[in-house]
């Protein structure tokens, strides 16, 4: 009986993962057709909300940012704005989608990133973020430290 329960649980999990992947792919396909959305070679999508005039950071730089992190259904799972405190970190120390985007941004910019799961957490669940999630971030690059 326990084996059957485990198998059924595994099937449910697999179905959820497939659904999540499919939903993410459909979202990105529709999103890339929107006016103002740029798609990079890696599949990262971004919109420039505010074009900054400052320098661009390198992978080795540390940056100060403000951001909102959402799932594609709009659920906010992380926000430096809500904490009232900008986040500081090494450019090379975050998810691949951010590493790529930050190096394209000028200080003073605000961008909306649409990050495919392969450039985020992939098949791994992180906190309230399910596996294979496409993530949406509003990122404001305040400073290169």
Image (cartoon, grey):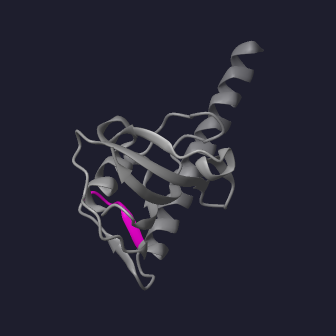
**Residue at horizontal 69 percent and vertical 55 percent from the top:** 75
**Residue at horizontal 63 percent and vertical 29 percent from the top:** 10
Query: Which stretch appears magenta?
Result: 42-47
Q: Nearer the viewer, residue 108 or 21?
A: 108
State the image quarter where residue 115 is shown: bottom left
Q: Nearer the viewer, residue 20 or 87?
A: 87
State the image quarter where residue 111 is shown: bottom left
Up the image or down, 56 lies above or below 16; here it is: below
**Residue at horizontal 69 percent and vertical 29 percent from the top:** 9
Q: Nearer the viewer, residue 35 or 63?
A: 63
Which residue is farthest bottom? Answer: 35
State how many labels appear: 0
Q: Is residue 98 visible?
A: yes
Up the image or down, 103 lies above or below 13; here it is: below
Q: Is residue 130 left or right of residue 6?
A: left
Q: Is residue 18 left or right of residue 29?
A: right
Q: Is residue 122 visible?
A: no
Q: Is residue 107 left or right of residue 134?
A: left
**Residue at horizontal 48 percent and vertical 37 percent from the top:** 123
State the image quarter where residue 73 is shown: bottom right
Q: Nearer the viewer, residue 38 or 49?
A: 49
* Percent x, y of residue 80: 59, 47
Question: Where does the C terminus fall, quadrant-wise?
Answer: top left
Question: Where does the N terminus fall, quadrant-wise?
Answer: top right
* Percent x, y of residue 79: 62, 49
Is 30 covered by the magenta stretch? no
Which residue is farthest top? Answer: 2
């Amino acid at each position: 009986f326990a084996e059957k329960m485990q198998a059924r649980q595994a099937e449910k999990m697999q179905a959820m993962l497939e659904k999540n992947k499919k939903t993410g792919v459909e979202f990105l396909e529709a999103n890339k057709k929107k006016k103002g959305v740029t798609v990079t070679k890696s599949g990262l999508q971004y919109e420039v909300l505010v074009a900054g005039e400052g320098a661009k950071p390198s992978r080795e730089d540390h940056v100060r940012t403000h951001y909102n992190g959402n799932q594609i259904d709009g659920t906010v799972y992380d926000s430096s704005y809500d904490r009232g405190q900008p986040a500081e970190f090494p450019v090379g120390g975050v998810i691949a989608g951010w590493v790529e985007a930050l190096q394209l941004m000028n200080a003073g910019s605000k961008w909306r990133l649409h990050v495919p799961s392969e450039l985020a957490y992939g098949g791994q669940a992180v906190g309230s973020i399910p596996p294979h999630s496409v993530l949406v971030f509003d990122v404001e690059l305040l400073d290169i430290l």
